[in-house]
Amino acid sequence: MASAARGAPVGTPLFARLRDRLRAHIVSGALAAGSKLPSEAQLEAEYGVSRITVRQALAELQAAGLIEKVNGKGSFVKRPEPPPGLRPLTGFNETMRQRGHKAMGTVTAPRALQADARVAAALRVPPRSPVSAITILRLVDGEAFARHTIWGRRSLIARLAAEDLQTNDVITIAQDRLGHRLDHSEMEISALNAGAQLARALGIARGAAVMCLAIVGFDANGKPLLFSDFLARGDRFRYPITMGR
C-alpha cells in the first residue's frame, strides 16, 4: 500500500500530502491529460487515508485546474492550457495564421550534444550534460522567417521530433500530446548581425539585422523544460507588447 506521507514534511496535513502526491503524478505525465483518476474508494485503500481526506485533496486539485470531475464518471486529468507568458514560444504558427499567412517549418533530425555553458545554465544542468537539439526553419508564405533551435533532455527532444513540428508549435505539442505542464517562461530579446550560415538559411545578406528571442520554458515544478533560440529576420520581425502600469 502506498503512503500519502512519503517525502512530506512532518506536520503536513494528510490531504495536502495526498494532493501533492497526485499533483506530482499529473505534472510528470505519469497521469496523462484526459486519463481517469482512481476512484475515491481506490485512493482511500491505496494511500491508507479517509474518504474525507481523499475528497479534500481532489477538491484542491480541481481548484488548481489540474483535474475536473464528471458527474457519474469520476475525476479526470485536465488538458493543460498554455499560459499567456509562453505565447512567444507556443503560438508562432497560430499567430501567423490568424494574421492571414501560411505558416509551416522544415525540421532537422535531433542532434545529440553535450550542453555548452549557455545551454547548461538555461536548463540548470552541469556543463557537458547530455542534451539534444532540434532546429526548425520557420517559413511564412513560403519564405524563410526565422531559425528556431530547441534544446532539452534527449528523451523529450526525441518525442517532439516524432510529432508534426512542420505545422504545429513546440510547446503546444509538449502540453497537448506529451502531457507536460508549463507554468511560465523567461525571455531575453537581443539583436545581432547574421553570420554567413544564418544569412544563407534566412535568405538575407551577411551582417543583416536579426532579432534573437532566447526563451526558457519552465514546468509546473519550476524546473526548466526547454531552452529555445528564435532568430528572426529583422526586416520582418514584429513583437507587440502590452504593458500595464
Image: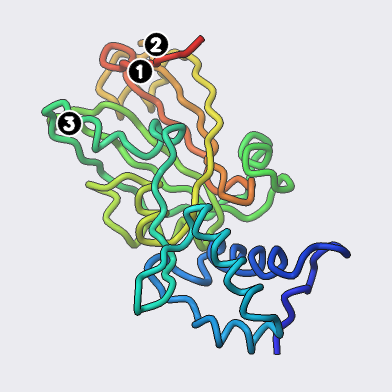
**What kind of element bears circle 3?**
helix
Disc 3 marks which amino acid?
Gln
In whole angstroms, how far apart are the C-alphas of marks 3 and 2?
Answer: 31 Å
Q: Residue at x 36, y 32 (%)?
A: 147
Q: Are marks 3 and 1 in contact (CB under 8 Å)?
A: no
**Marker disc for residue 98:** 3
Q: Who is closer to the viewer here, 22 or 133? A: 22
Residue 209 in the image: above or below residue 56: above
Badge 3 density bin: few <14, some 14–19, many ≥20, Cα 10 Å: few
Q: Residue at x 25, y 41 (%)?
A: 105
**Marker disc for residue 239:** 1
Disc 2 marks which amino acid?
Gly
Residue 58 in the image: above or below residue 168: below
Tell me which numbered mark, 2 or 1, is placed earlier along the sequence.
Answer: 2
- Tell me the residue that label 2 is attached to: 207
**Marker disc for residue 116:** none
In whole angstroms, how far apart are the C-alphas of marks 3 and 1?
Answer: 15 Å
Q: Residue at x 22, y 47 (%)?
A: 167
The picture quadrant where one finds residue 160 is: bottom left
